Image (spheres, rainbow, N blue to C red):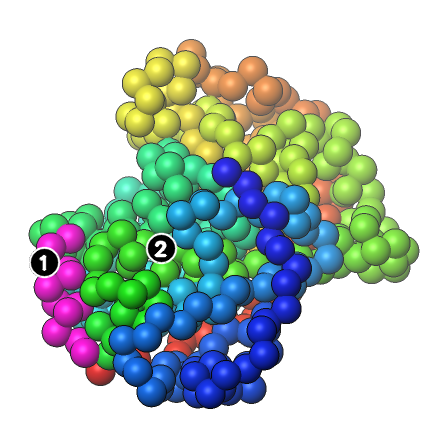
Amino acid sequence: MKLAIPNTELPPATPLRKAVLGGLAVCAVALLSSWAAPDANAVVSHEYKFKLPLGLDESGISIPADNPITTQKVELGRALFFDKRLSNDNTIACANCHLPQFGFTDGQPVATGIKGQKGGRSAPASINRVFSSVQFWDGRAATLEDQSIGPFTNPIEHGFANYEVMITKMKKIQGYKTMFLQTFGEDITIQNVGKAIASFQRTILSGNSPADRFDVGGETEAISGPAQRGLLLFRDKARCTKCHSGFNFTDEKFHNLGIGWDDNKVDLGRYMVTKNTEEIGAFKTPTLREISRSAPYMHDGRFKTLDDVVNFYNQGGVKNPHQDPLILPLELTKEEKQDLVQFLRTLTGEGWKHIAPPATFPQ
């Protein structure tokens, strides 16, 4: 369900609101100190107002009806996202795999969890998830709320035996009990953990890139000549928009490119979720925003550079019985490939720089 974000103003401040929010701007994320309310059990709920960077489309915002976004959920989710105590051995937080400097991935071929264990796939970028529905490379999570809690019971990632063990651990932290009561009006539950983290993740945005300023803002010198040629190639000869379409540069669909069919390391991907043989080896199209930060590339992190990726597509991927018919040889020249990479590098933007760990965590 897609909901428009109402353009409402905050009601006149009451003593309670002043104690909770202080001088917080409407679109800013609250500080942890704002949770000092006169009544620790009072539910405090203020709508979070998005301020979308240039290039992003408000009509694409997707927020479930049962989880309206509030500043309190965002701040609680931020604490949960960065808190390593939400792993079995206190060493891994969600943020370990989603770092700003790496386009909210971890800069590694595959994700690393507790005890240094390696997963089988790279960490997907967690930017612009407010415009997305199904999550993970294989789409096994129907919502961002489901995705937000999935890694906690993965033995390689956060390592809890089950959600009950995790929630029992969290309930020993009085600060979290207070924050959940103030945010949801009830004690800690795994469902509300997911709602809070998902709300926070929806505030990680990327827009107002040089490409946006050129293509949407009309700044003719925002990107270089080679990048401008690369944009034309992106839309035409290179066929990139067949999958990387729309303002978020993804069709949110699943495609078999041939990854793994050349070295006998095939991951069945989407097929393991749907059991549809047409989706064997298919993976979700990632957004290209912040792509120059998020190397290495593909679901198994096999390509170190954008040049490697463009060369792979130029040869038409790897042929296999289930390859998507959209994947064809491109016959790009050396210069054209270089221009395309130059354009991709202009998709580094803004809207995520407010993301940082809280100064303190609930105790």
Residue 59 or residue 242, whichever sits in front? 59
Name which residue lies at 36% across and 60% down.
Answer: 196
Badge 1 is on which residue?
165
Q: Looking at the rendering, which quadrant does residue 7 occupy? A: bottom right
Question: In the image, 150: left or right of 206?
Answer: left
How many numbered tags mark residues here? 2
Does the magenta-highlighted stretch encompass residue 165? yes
Question: In the image, 295: left or right of 179?
Answer: right
Question: In the image, 130: left or right of 6?
Answer: left
Residue 157 x, y percent position in the rendering: 23, 54
Residue 259 x, y percent position in the rendering: 43, 30
Say which label, 1 or 2, has the lower sequence index: 1
Name which residue lies at 61% across and 43% down.
Answer: 60
Residue 92 x, y percent position in the rendering: 25, 65
The span picked out in magenta is: 163-174
Residue 242 or residue 17, whichever sits in front? 17
- Quadrant for the C terminus in the image: bottom left
Indicate the amino acid at tag 1.
Val
Residue 205 or residue 43, whichever sits in front? 43
Badge 2 is on which residue?
195
Disc 2: CA contacts within 10 A as few (<14), some (14-19) or many (>=20): many
Name which residue lies at 47% across and 39% down.
Answer: 133
Circle on res. 76: none
Question: In the image, 301: left or right of 238?
Answer: left
Q: Is residue 164 above or below residue 312?
A: below
Disc 2 element: helix
Q: CA distance from mark 1 to mark 2?
A: 19 Å
